[in-house]
Image (cartoon, rainbow, N blue to C red):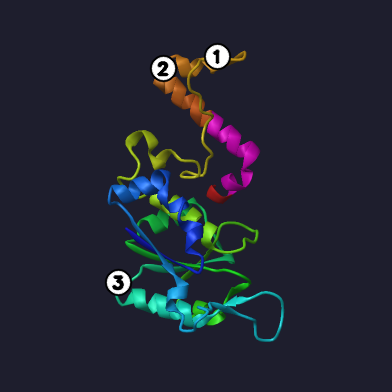
Amino acid sequence: MRIDIVTGLPKLLESPLQESIIRRAQDKGKVQILVHDLREFTHDKHKTIDDTPYGGGAGMILKPEPVFECVEHLQQQRVYDEIILLAADGETLNQRVANDLSLKENLLLICGHYKGVDERVRESLVTRVLSIGDFVLTGGELAAAVVVDAVVRLVPGVLNDSESALSDSFQDGLLGAPQYTRPPEYRGMKVPDVLLSGNHSEIEKWRQSQRAERTESRRSDSLKKNS
């Protein structure tokens, strides 16, 4: 898989894309992630990527020219399965969306910033708009990092068996079960006996019951969506 990210603030993405699972995926050659600076596609001495909105109003808008030129430059080299704009009013990212995107070969993410992106970018370039929640961020860079993390860990070969994404919360609509590790007792708090029993069938029954109970109490909306 290859993921290209278009942004006016590439430094915001440096650390998130070079740590943990995302770094491992790149080191293994399972994923290639490239960040493209919008300012390299400007033609004025100030490298301007934003301007005031027509009609007045607060804030600045990402100009269409650098976005179009950057995306079209990338499109000359490959065909993208999805060109995704990160924006607060987009489709909410969830596990189903992450699963779908993990099956793609080439993804292009455009980071919205300031007050938004010129609407012509959406109309002509974007195939999908994603949000990571009903709140506003300064820009789409952190949202892009979240999308990359959610998708990359699902790519076959990125995680080993003990970290399998198939057991993650929300893969089947349920939250994960409580997890414990050594020591078996700490400050008077004990690990449930069933987890120490070695009886794998009973352990699985316990985990499933805990998952259902947790989902009902914490995220009943998830149960309704998957019923």
Tell me, for residue 158, which label it has, or none. none
Q: Is residue 144 visible?
A: no
**Residue holding disc 3:** 78
Tell me, for residue 185, which label it has, or none. 1
Q: Which residues are magenta?
A: 210-224
Q: x, y (%) of residue 41? A: 43, 78
The residue tagged with tag 1: helix, strand or loop? strand
Q: Residues within 10 Å of mark 3 (few under 14, many from 20)?
A: few
- Are the residues tagged 1 and 3 within 8 Å (C-beta)? no
Q: Amino acid at mark 3?
A: Arg
Question: Does the magenta run of residues contain 97?
Answer: no
Q: Amino acid at mark 1?
A: Glu
Q: x, y (%) of residue 87? A: 57, 66
Earlier sequence position, callout 2 versus callout 3: 3
Q: Amino acid at mark 2?
A: Asn
Q: Residues within 10 Å of mark 1 (few under 14, many from 20)?
A: few
Going by the image, does 56 lie left or right of 76? right
Q: x, y (%) of residue 23? A: 37, 48
Towards the viewer: 14 or 150:
14
**Residue holding disc 2:** 199
Towards the viewer: 175 or 116:
116
Q: Does residue 81 lie above or below 57 as drawn?
A: above
> Which mark is in front, 1 or 2?
1
